[in-house]
Image: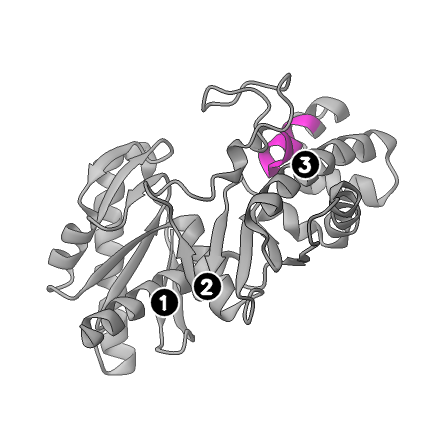
Amino acid sequence: MKAALVGTDGTLLHEARRATGRKRGADAVVETILAFAAELRAYGEEHFGETAVAAGVAVPGIVDAGKGIAVYSANLGWRDVPMRALLGERLGGIPVALGHDVRTGGLAEGRIGAGRGADRFLFVPLGTGIAGAIGIGSTIEAGAHGYAGEIGHIVVRPDGPECHCGQHGCLETLASASAVTRAWAAASGDPEADAADCAKAVESGDPAAIAVWRDAVDALAAGLVTALTLLDPRTLIIGGGLAEAGETLFTPLRAAVEERVTFQKLPHIVPAALGDTAGCLGAGLLAWDLLSTEVSA
């Protein structure tokens, strides 16, 4: 977990990290979050002379932001956690905003990161899986049921590997950092090899690595062109672990997307600017938005 104290202008004032402790079960994870937030608030009082006036928390999985409920997370093992109410109680009744981790990261990238100034953008982090955040103005579109942006489950190869969602050939089974890690471990014969190792091998001209990388980029481009056909973003922001490969990813990806577009307008394809602090900053922005809404109301 990553946590931060964030100023009114999005400035990162203090950052801290802690393991989720998920091996101890879902209840332990929730308690860790609550304790972490309380400690962060106390740090602000001690070092900045004032308390936090609102809190934002971003969690993975299915989130009902309106009701403040963390509905489901396969990775963390929880169901229907009233996160907003629990945090509000632990933090002395201050307002609490709850958001989805990728959409929250996208909010930060859109307002103060790589998408600043873009009226329409799509933020796509390539990590363990692939998700997306649809930016419209200074807000993120959640969809009617909170599922908007699940680009990782666009089917790009119907005869591809089975996805945990029940489909075959989903984008995240082929182009996530996890997918590249699996493919390169198999191709290299090294079970410890990962996506970063594959990128290094590509840069050194290894034919097997180039083939693995090309397959992933091809799948990613196919999924992204589907997304930009539907959404017509002005800027396409790529983040997550795979984006750390820099131009080893972006040069072939831009070319592959350009080859596939016909009538569509090609967006600017850029790397994310905020790295793994995007979620913290986005959660802070959610909190400030909550205060602004209360004031205007």
- Secondary structure mostly seen in the magenta stretch: helix
Look at the image and tell me whether residue 25 can be seen.
Answer: no
Magenta part of the chain: 174-183
Q: Which amino acid type is marked by label 1? A: Leu
The reply to whether the C-beta atoms of the residues labelled 1 and 2 are less than 8 Å apart is yes
Q: Is residue 217 left or right of residue 167?
A: right
Separation of disc 3 and disc 2 at Cα?
Answer: 26 Å
Q: Is residue 176 in the magenta section?
A: yes
| Residue on which the image places disc 2 | 108
Q: Quadrant location of residue 97?
A: bottom left
Sequence order check, earlier mark of 3 and 1: 3
Q: Nearer the viewer, residue 6 or 263?
A: 263
Q: Nearer the viewer, mark 3 or mark 1?
A: 3
| Residue on which the image places disc 1 | 285
| Residue on which the image places disc 3 | 222
* Residue farthest along the front direction in this orientation: 263
Q: Residue at (23%, 68%) from the top-left corner?
A: 54
Q: Is residue 213 in the magenta section?
A: no
**Mark 2 nearby-residue class (10 Å; few <14, some 14–19, many ≥20):** many
Q: Which amino acid type is marked by label 3? A: Ala
Give coordinates of residue 10: x percent, y percent: 41, 73
Whether residue 108 is situated above or below residue 259 in the rendered picture? below
